[in-house]
Amino acid sequence: EVQLVESGGGLVQPGGSLRLSCAASGFTFSSYEMNWVRQAPGKGLEWISYISNSGNSIHYADSVKGRFFISRDNAKNSLSLQMNSLRAEDTAVYYCARDALRIPRSHDSWGQGTLVIVSS
Amino acid sequence: DIQMTQSPSSLSASIGDRVTITCRASQSISIYLNWYQQKPGKAPNLLIYAASNLQSGVPSRFSGSGSGTDFTLTISSLQPEDFATYYCQESYSVPLEYTFGQGTKLEIK
């Protein structure tokens, strides 16, 4: 069974940093492209970052470019999101999402999410 | 940047109704369009990929159609578990942006 489990969320002050993790199991992690998607309270879904299966290709949404950094450790079946210079508008549930092995791309498996609150 | 616009933003319907949700892209995206269902407090769930392909395990009452800029998600006969929020998403942008629509909340009438 495919499982994605996020961790690392919590309360952080504006300007602070936080590192999210996503532990993957039940599939060959190194074969799959991965993403982070977030959802502010009461709002819609916002894709924020993508990483290829090898880690050689990375993309970010403009809203987080230069502040957030995605990475992966295929040996540990783990995806990470380093979040710096956090703002109140970064408050959201953060999901890791796997891309299906096909084109066009789609997110076929999601974690349960981890809540990040940016507040003083 | 590609903008995705869903209509309506909310919708009330009854059990057994046929329901259609529309998604329009600001430019042609071929068939690079996905649909997700999200229930309160839960992660989204992929329903339809590549505009019209049913994801494994999704009931056949869900269907998708369209290409270019105009797409529809249809639920042929609403069931109690279908009351949720639905999102479309494009995967056409280069570089990748994966823009979502704003969502359509489907409520019980």
Image (cartoon, rainbow, N blue to C red):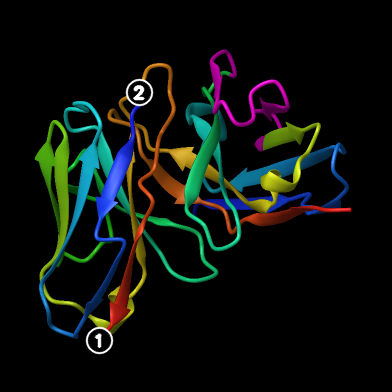
Expressed as whole percent of the image width and height from the top left, the position of residue A106 reads: 36, 39
What amino acid is labelled 1 in the image? Lys
Expressed as whole percent of the image width and height from the top left, the position of residue A90 reads: 69, 44
Residue B92, by quadrant, is top left
Q: Nearer the viewer, residue A78 or B39?
A: B39
What amino acid is labelled 2 in the image? Ser
Circle 2 is placed at which residue position?
B93
Circle 1 is placed at which residue position?
B109
Q: Nearer the viewer, mark 1 or mark 2?
A: 1
> Which residue is at 52% across, 22% downward?
A52
Expressed as whole percent of the image width and height from the top left, the position of residue B26 reads: 25, 31
Task: State whether residue A103 is above or below residue B14.
Answer: above
> Which residue is at 66% across, 28% downward?
A72
Observer able to see residue B55? no
Label 2: chain letter: B
Label 1: chain letter: B
> Which residue is at 21% across, 41% downward?
B24
> Which residue is at 59% across, 47% downward?
A25
Residue found at the very far top of the displayed protein: A56
Q: Secondary structure at mark 2?
A: loop
In-image side of A105 versus A95 (left or right): left
Residue range highlighted in magenta: A55-78
Q: Nearer the viewer, residue A32 or B15?
A: B15
Expressed as whole percent of the image width and height from the top left, the position of residue B54 reads: 20, 52
Task: State whether residue B80 is above or below residue B54.
Answer: below
Distance Cα–Cα, label 1 vs label 2: 37 Å
Observer able to see residue A50? yes
